[in-house]
Amino acid sequence: MAATDFFSTPGGVAVITGSALPVLSLSFQDWGGYGNYRAVITSLSVQFEGGRQFLHTLEDMIFLYVFGERMGEMTISGVCFSDVCAGATPGELGRVGHGAERVLGHYVGHRVTFRAEPVLVAFGVDTAFECFLTGVGVAINDPEKGLGQFTYRLSVVPPATFDVEAVILT
């Protein structure tokens, strides 16, 4: 079976329409997406954990102390490009720059050390989290094609409720 190359130019990307795959909606505050950043978010993970302590006594008793929900951890990762989308013109993206540069610029303007208020990350229909952007990693993995990847690290404010139907922030 022959490999299909979806890139019309090195570092570029093409949009494939008509896919039967389900699409999950994702919104990251002030994220410009491919059109502005030459970068595409490809994964999101979030973890929560309750604050607790187990005390084991000499008489084989175990006591549980609960301190509430801890801050969660979120990772947003993606791919960054050096060229415009197939069929687009370079002028549609404004100034010239690799997607990795745009990702770093987004981090600088939204990092926890720069702004006191959280950023909002929403996905699906009713799920949203208030987060603090705490770190970023960027790598150029394929210099010949101009491809790279990035990862944002965020601390997540634990939601007041976590319902199957929706996450509601108070």
Image (cartoon, grey):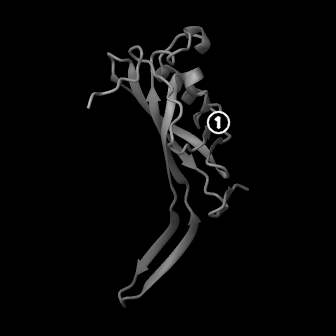
Q: Quadrant of residue 8?
A: top left
Query: Does the rendering let one see residue 137?
Result: no
Given the current orientation, which residue lies at the most extreme right position? 170
Q: Position of residue 161 (x, y in %)?
A: 66, 63
Given the current orientation, which residue lies at the most extreme left position? 1
Q: Position of residue 12 (x, y in %)?
A: 44, 18
Q: Residue at x 50, y 70 (%)?
A: 52
Is 42 positioned to the left or the right of 123 in the image? Answer: left
Is 141 positioned to the left or the right of 36 in the image? Answer: left
Q: Quadrant of the C terminus?
A: bottom right
Q: Quadrant of the N terminus?
A: top left
Q: Which residue is mark 1?
A: 29
Q: Residue at x 55, y 14 (%)?
A: 88
Image label count: 1
Is 100 positioned to the left or the right of 159 in the image? Answer: left
Disc 1 packing (10 Å; few <14; some 14–19; many ≥20) = few
- Label 1 secondary element: loop
Q: Amino acid at mark 1?
A: Gln
Q: Residue at x 68, y 40 (%)?
A: 117
Q: Position of residue 109 (x, y in %)?
A: 61, 27
Is 24 drawn above or below residue 11 in the view shown? below
Q: Residue at x 61, y 52 (%)?
A: 157
Is 158 drawn above or below residue 61 in the view shown? above
Is 148 positioned to the left or the right of 95 in the image? Answer: left
Query: Does the rendering let one see residue 22?
Result: yes
Q: Position of residue 15 (x, y in %)?
A: 51, 26
Q: Quadrant of residue 60?
A: bottom left
Given the current orientation, which residue lies at the most extreme bottom position? 59
Closer to the camera in the image, 60 or 75: 75
Is 73 drawn above or below residue 84 in the view shown? below
